[in-house]
Structures are given as C-alpha cells and as structure tokens.
Amino acid sequence: MTTDRPDTASDSWRLRPAAQQPLWPDPHALAAAVHDLSSYPPLVFAGECDRLRDRIAAVARGEAFILQGGDCAETFDAVTADQVRAKLRTLLQMAAVLTYASSVPVVKIGRIAGQYSKPRSRPTEVRDGVELPAYRGDAVNGLDFTPRSRTPDPERLKRMYHASAATLNLVRAFTTGGYADLHQVHEWNRDFVANSPIGERYDSLARDIDAALAFLAACGAAPAEFRSSEVFASHEALLLDYEAALTRTDSRTGQPYDVSGHLLWIGERTRQLDGAHVEFASRVRNPIGVKLGPSTTPDEALALIDKLDPEREPGRITFITRMGATGIRDVLPELVAKVGAHGAQPAWICDPMHGNTFAARSGHKTRRFDDVLDEVRGFFEVHRALGTHPGGIHVELTGEDVTECVGGGSPIRLTDLDRRYESACDPRLNREQSLDLAFQVAELYRERATVRPRAGAEADSAGSGTAGAYAPSPRATTRDLP
C-alpha cells in the first residue's frame, strides 16, 4: 500500500528543463490545485505496479506479450459505462486471439484512466487570423476554439484525477464482475468472424479456439482466470505537476511510486536525457516506457537505460518503438542488437500508429491500415532475424465504429473520414480494424514460431540473444499476408 504523504525525493525534476508544459496563467491557482491533489487517495497501488513489473519482466524474457491500447487522448465527456465497456471489450477480444496464437500470457495495458494530456508540435493554433493556445488535452484546456476554452486551467487537473478514478472503478468492475469471462469474449470474436466481411479469413483460428475451449470443458477445467481479467492502466507522464502531486511513499519499502497509473511512459518529444521527464521517471518505482522514434541512436537508448534502470532490473524498462512503416526495418535492427550486446534486456514493443500519420485533403489527420500493419510486420521481421522477442504492440484504438483511419478489411476511404471522426486528437483504429489487426498479428506470431533465426542470430532459450546481421525485406501490404 502507499501512504498519503507526497514524496519529496521526486521533486528533483524541477531543477531540469521541462518540455511541453502548459503556460498556466495563474501560478497561485496551479499551486492550490497541486496542493489539493497531493492530499487525494492513490488511484493505483504500489503492489499493483510491482505486479506489472513482474509481468513485463516475463515479456523481456520472451515468455509473454504486451497488448497496450486505448484512446489517443481521453476526454472528460467519454467517462461513461458504455464508452469504457466498448474499449475494454475490444482489448479483451484482441487479447483472447493473441493469447491463443502466441501460447504465452498477454499482458493487457490500457491507454486509460490518465491519458488526458497531449504534447503539441506548436504552442498555438491559428484559425482565420485568430491565434489561440493549442489544445493540449482535457487536463489542460478545452477543444472549443475560444479564448476562454483554450486558456489553461489548473482546476482541470483535479477533474482529470476524478475522471481517472471513475474510469478505474468501471474497469475493475467489468474485469472482475463476469464481463471478462473468456467464453463470452470468444463468443464476441465468433460474431466478428461470422458477420464481418473480412471474418472468413480468420475462421480457422476461431475454430481452433473453439476446439481448445471445448477440450478444457470436457476435462472439467474451469480456472478462475477464465472468469476475470487483469488490466493495467498507463498514460504518458506529461504534466509533471500532476504526476509529482500523485507520487507517494510506499509504506512497505519506503520507495516513491507515482500512483496516477501502473505504467508511465516518456514521449518522443520529452525523452531528453537531461530533461525533467527523464529525471522524474528515474525517481519513481513504476515500470517505465520510453517512446523511441526513427532518429534514436543506440547510444541514446543505452544512456536512457543507464539513467532509468542503472541496476538492470527486469521489467523496469519498456522501449516503445515508433519508427514508421518506411523506417522500422532500417532503424530497429541496430538498436536491438547494440542494446542486447550491452547486456540490457528491455521489453520491446511496437507503436505502429505515430510514425504513419498524414493529413488528408479534407484536413483530417489519418493513418492507413496497411501502413500500421506493415510497421508491425517489419517489427516482427527484425526480431525474428535477430533471434530476439517481439514483445508486443501499442495501438491507439476505440471500441466505437469511427471513421478515422483509412483502409482495413471493410475499407474506410478518404472521403469517409468526416462521417464519424470523433477523436479529440489523433486518429484511432475502430473496433473492426482493431480486431483485424489482432488476427493478423496472431498470424505473424505463429509465422515467427515456425521460422528459424538467420545465421548470426544466437537466440537463447528465453527468446533474447546476441543479435546478428539483418537484411531488410521489401515493404509488405495486407495482400502479402498469408
């Protein structure tokens, strides 16, 4: 458990440059909001964070797979039972398919209960000659393009806390109250296979799962794990005043934990080694993720490990690569090889969303499903060639039938984007696209298991080894998949 006392050791970040922080107009109002937050109960507990670190350690050893997904940016008005249930249902459906195909546990981590802030490329936005602060997420300001809405308001930090608490309560109720029963989740996937225009290609895998469940039932096997599910919460630790206010001292160990979420990640824009975000993350005991874009060098990755995980603790660090479909095969091999050669063993997972965004003529930000899938395919190819473990995927998704990403089995066209474009920030895969991706990742995982590493890749029994040479293959599309 954690005490209600804030931990002062985590305030060393205030001596470092902090990127992507809002320009709060009233420092006294910010101080008052932070003071209130520092007295609020934990949203998660230190023991839960430790359990997730153990799960991620298994991923790093090649014994588990991470599925991390949810909204690009949560909004306060989406904290309803229906909205949370739809996202959770999609995650559970994807996880059921991946668990069966990979034959390893799938660690389910939501981008949920804290993803209310976003970094921005520019601090302001201009419309029709009017310049206002950029929308930085509901935790900072409003989406409406008015001076009042766009003025950063620290009271929103408290609303973020309460919205996160409500979301976590719903997630815990759904995952332990029977909604996550594996047999029910599989029935949802059977409906997808039967009713979706693209479902037929996945009929064989669905029937295999049917047979496995029937066999277990015939044996009288009904483990408790079939009736509930473990879902962890994660978000980008962007607003450091909020994160510091929710840092508490664990009464068991005397160590500081950021109790705003189980896993916190540092974004591509804020991973400066001498910056405030890396300093803050180095001081808390949560498992930490770091986004790595195509400009990342092996030396930078190793320096981040030295700063964030000097003891090389299993499960402490997850590298979330966001290279883009055109860069993954060129950049990732050297990173994985050199990090492994130095004895570090982070979990490697693929974010195939952020490197594949473009603007349509309509002005909508969007992504092509083929590009998302191709980056995942490239991620698997690299790890297969090096004899290392492709540890998971990190996806922006929703359980709703939105039209924000183009392509997929029931293709959304560029002209369809304005039909249901509901994201407050970046485009998300809808439910059908998310399930399509899960089934195709399942095929990739099975393919990985049947192909031996190339010469020079000396894989150890845990699925991570000293990487050898890697020759990139041509880019693939969905037509290239089996």
Image (cartoon, helix red, strand yellow):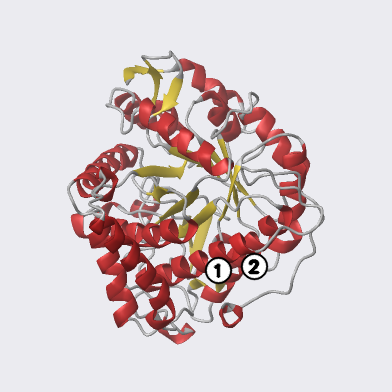
The picture quadrant where one finds residue 234 is top left
Assign a secondary structure to mark 1.
Answer: helix
Classify 133 as above or below 422.
Answer: above
Mark 2 highlights which residue?
325
Is residue 241 in sight in this rendering?
yes
Mark 1 highlights which residue?
372
Q: Tell which of 221 and 474 is nearer to you.
A: 221
Residue 294 drawn at (x, y percent)? 70, 56
Q: Residue at x 22, y 52 (%)?
A: 220
Earlier residue among tags 1 and 2: 2
Q: Residues within 10 Å of mark 2 (few under 14, many from 20)?
A: many
Q: Residue at x 73, y 53 (%)?
A: 386
Query: Along the horizontal axis of the image, is 257 left or right of 212?
Result: right
Q: Quadrant of the N terminus?
A: top left
Calculate the distance from the C-alpha at mark 1 to the C-alpha at mark 2: 7 Å
Q: Quadrant of the C terminus?
A: bottom right
Assign a secondary structure to mark 2.
Answer: loop
Query: Along the horizontal axis of the image, is 143 left or right of 470?
Result: left
Q: Tell which of 433 and 228 is nearer to you.
A: 228
Type of the residue with mark 2: Ala
Residue 452 drawn at (x, y percent)? 69, 60
Q: Tell which of 405 and 122 is nearer to you.
A: 405
Residue 260 drawn at (x, y percent)? 37, 34
Classify 279 as above or below 200.
Answer: above
Type of the residue with mark 1: Val
The picture quadrant where one finds residue 95 is bottom left
